[in-house]
């Protein structure tokens, strides 16, 4: 890390083992994403409950180029569990941040569109015509929301295609 790790505690004593755990987890974050500018970890006891006992709260502020990632999870009865859970969340957030920095964003798979070309209602199957002009078989069980009976020739649908024993078939068909 370019700036030193800052560890602070309020209403709780941080022993050597706990500090070593925090330093180890912070070092792993730095190895995971080397653009971290600074990291502040704050441990406190927000309140003491007679029923649940002491609850530890861990907040991690990670300074990165262009902003700050803040991790604040639900308090936990076990300080080490609270620390580990907070750093796991921090790593997930850093992963998302790093992906966005590299321009890698999740692309959503769009289902192909087709039209019902032929339908055999009594037999429980039909054929779709894709935009490329290919015919794709489908069975009534592949039609979502039990809408097989409402399908008509020419209706637009989306589908998921897979290779079957006798060629291409739709494993899922949805009415548009």
Image (cartoon, helix red, strand yellow):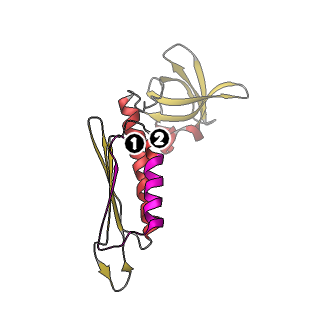
Q: Residue at x 43, y 54 (%)?
A: 87
Secondary structure category for the residue under label 1: helix
**Residue 124 on the magenta span:** no
**Is residue 84 shown to the viewer in this render?**
no
Give the residue number, with chain letter if any, for mark 2: 32
Which mark, by number, is residue 94? Answer: 1
Marks 1 and 2 close (CB-CB < 8 Å): yes
Q: Residue furthest bottom?
A: 50
Which mark, by number, is residue 12? Answer: none
**Residue 2 on the magenta span:** yes
Q: Residue at x 53, y 13 (%)?
A: 133
Name the front one of labels 1 and 2. 2
Relative to 5, does residue 131 appear above or below in the rendering?
Answer: above
Q: Residue at x 43, y 58 (%)?
A: 22
**Is residue 41 shown to the viewer in this render?**
yes
Using residue 123 as the reference point, say whether residue 133 is left or right of it.
Answer: left
């Amino acid at each position: 890390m370019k700036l030193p790790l800052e560890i602070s505690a309020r209403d709780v004593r941080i022993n050597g083992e706990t500090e070593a755990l925090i330093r180890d987890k912070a070092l792993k974050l730095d190895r995971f994403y080397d653009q971290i500018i600074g990291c502040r970890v704050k441990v406190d006891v927000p309140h003491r409950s007679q029923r649940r006992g002491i609850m530890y709260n861990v907040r991690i502020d990670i300074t990165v180029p262009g902003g700050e990632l803040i991790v604040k999870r639900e308090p936990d009865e076990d300080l080490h569990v609270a620390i580990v859970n907070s750093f796991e969340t921090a790593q997930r957030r850093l992963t998302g941040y790093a992906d966005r920095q590299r321009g890698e964003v999740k692309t959503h798979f769009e289902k192909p569109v087709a039209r019902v070309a032929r339908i055999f209602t009594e037999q429980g199957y039909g054929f779709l015509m894709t935009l490329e002009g290919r015919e794709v078989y489908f069975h009534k069980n592949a039609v979502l929301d039990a809408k097989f009976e409402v399908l008509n020739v020419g209706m637009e649908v989306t589908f998921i295609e897979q290779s079957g024993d006798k060629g291409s078939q739709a494993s899922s068909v949805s009415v548009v």
